[in-house]
Amino acid sequence: SLQSVLTISTPPRRPDLGERKLAEWRKKGGGDLEPVLASGAVALLDAQWIISHAEAGGVLAHRQALPKEAFLSLAELVEATAHPSFLPVAALSYPWLTKDHPDPRGANLFRVARALKALLSYPDIIPRLGIFWDFGSLHQHPDPANGVLRTE
């Protein structure tokens, strides 16, 4: 019958690249990040954007003031999962330089960008990198009129 010919001649379905990347992302623990990223509670900054912003002399603004292109989507993070041992995600932590802004002159932004540029100089290992940086990754709920620039 035609059905048996189609069954015999059709190769078994293989997972596409996206499904394999998602499986790899989850195998490495990325599934634990999915709920918080999908909820919007946390947004990861694109290391390439950080580098460009720093090289242009910028200062990191609070999350709500950053452009959409400053962030990597969950799909972009999954797609960037290339290395067999780790996720394309990094976290940054350091003391704020003032009570209102972690880096008002962009000096730390410049230093971080320099380190990220070195990391991303190996695109076969790290094609893209999502950065958790509290000021840019979490909602800060600023209310400058009342002197509130940071959530405690």
Image: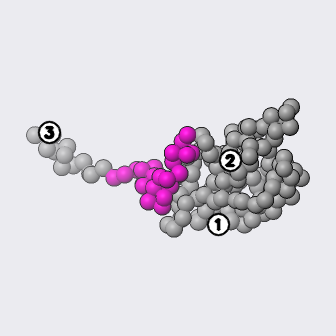
The amino acid type, in three-letter code, at marker 3 is Leu
The residue lying toward the viewer, choosing from 52 and 138, is 138
Q: Which residue is mark 2?
A: 137
The residue lying toward the viewer, choosing from 94 and 31, is 94
Q: Residue at x 75, y 65 (%)?
A: 115
Q: Which residue is mark 1?
A: 122
Regarding residue 108, the answer to whether it shows in the image is yes
The amino acid type, in three-letter code, at marker 1 is Tyr
In reply to whether residue 76 is colored magenta, the answer given is: no
Give the magenta-colored segment's residue range.
14-39
Q: Nearer the viewer, mark 2 or mark 1?
A: 2
Marks 1/3 in contact by CB < 8 Å: the verdict is: no
In reply to whether residue 37 is colored magenta, the answer given is: yes
The residue lying toward the viewer, choosing from 42 and 145, is 145
The residues bearing labels 2 and 1 have C-alpha atoms spaced at a distance of: 25 Å
Regarding residue 110, the answer to whether it shows in the image is no
The residues bearing labels 2 and 3 have C-alpha atoms spaced at a distance of: 56 Å
Q: Residue at x 60, y 58 (%)?
A: 89
| Mark 3 crowdedness (10 Å alpha carbons): few <14, some 14-19, many ≥20 | few
Give x and y (percent) for residue 62. 76, 43
**Dominant SS in magenta:** helix
Q: Nearer the viewer, mark 1 or mark 3?
A: 1
Marks 2/1 in contact by CB < 8 Å: the verdict is: no
Q: Which residue is mark 3?
A: 2
Q: Residue at x 74, y 46 (%)?
A: 152
N-terminal of the pair, mark 2 or mark 3, is: 3
Q: Quadrant of the N terminus?
A: top left
Up-down: is 111 above or below 152?
A: below
Report helix, strand or loop for mark 2. Answer: helix
Image quarter for residue 129?
bottom right
Describe the colour scheme in one phrase: one colour
The residues bearing labels 1 and 3 have C-alpha atoms spaced at a distance of: 51 Å
